[in-house]
Image: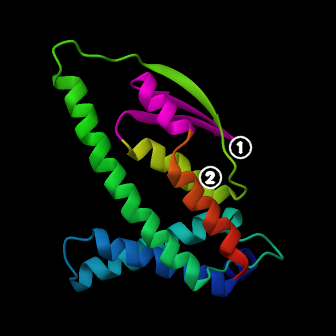
Amino acid sequence: MYFQKRIDDPKGFMLFTIILLIFWFLMSPSLSLRNIAVGLVCCLAVTYFWSPDLFKPGQPFRIAPRQVAQLAVYLLLLAYNVVVANVHVALIVLSPKLPISPGFILVKTKLQNELTRTLYANSITLTPGTITINLNSDRLLVHALTKGTAQGVCDWHLENRLREMEVSKGD
């Protein structure tokens, strides 16, 4: 009984679980029966645990096919940016002068959806040289290794990619 009361959007629940399971398979070292079972249980548990935050009454969780394609492009661009930032941080660390100027910057995001804001904040953290310290409504507190990195966070093109995903939700 508790399970049915907690899940207001069973289709959204299954869709989100499948998305997590696909990610699990992409990150898994093998496709053994044990690994598949552990992945399925973990993905179901995570979706169930976060269901009050993911599935709001009267707001079904839906993803348009266009959003899936945009997310794939976003993840590829993020991977590229992570590699570039790794090289940049390595050059800074290996430089004899160690040209760092660490500091905090407050960034106001144009993103409207909590999920895309969280994805953006995590993307900043995944990128070497920057860490999102706090996400409060539409403001992110970011620590950056250099002034140039901080400036890059302010006008990072990946925010616009996420904004496009929000806009295309109605498709």
Q: Which amino acid does the dot numbered 1 rest on?
A: Asp
In this rendering, is residue 103 above or below 117? above
Asked if residue 147 is among those painted magenta in the image, a careful observer would answer yes
Task: Please report the bounds of the magenta region as a residue range.
Answer: 128-154
Q: Residues within 10 Å of mark 2 (few under 14, many from 20)?
A: many
Q: Secondary structure at mark 1?
A: loop
The answer to whether residue 107 is seen in the rendering is yes
**Viewer-proximal residue among 17 and 170:** 170
Q: Which residue is mark 1?
A: 138
Q: Which amino acid does the dot numbered 2 rest on?
A: Arg
Residue at x 62% of width, y 65% of height: 164
Residue at x 59% of width, y 56% of height: 160
x then y, percent, for residue 136:
69, 39
Q: Which residue is mark 2?
A: 117
Counting residues from the start of the chain, the first of labels 1 and 2 encountered is 2
x then y, percent, for residue 102:
42, 19
In this rendering, is residue 168 above or below 97? below
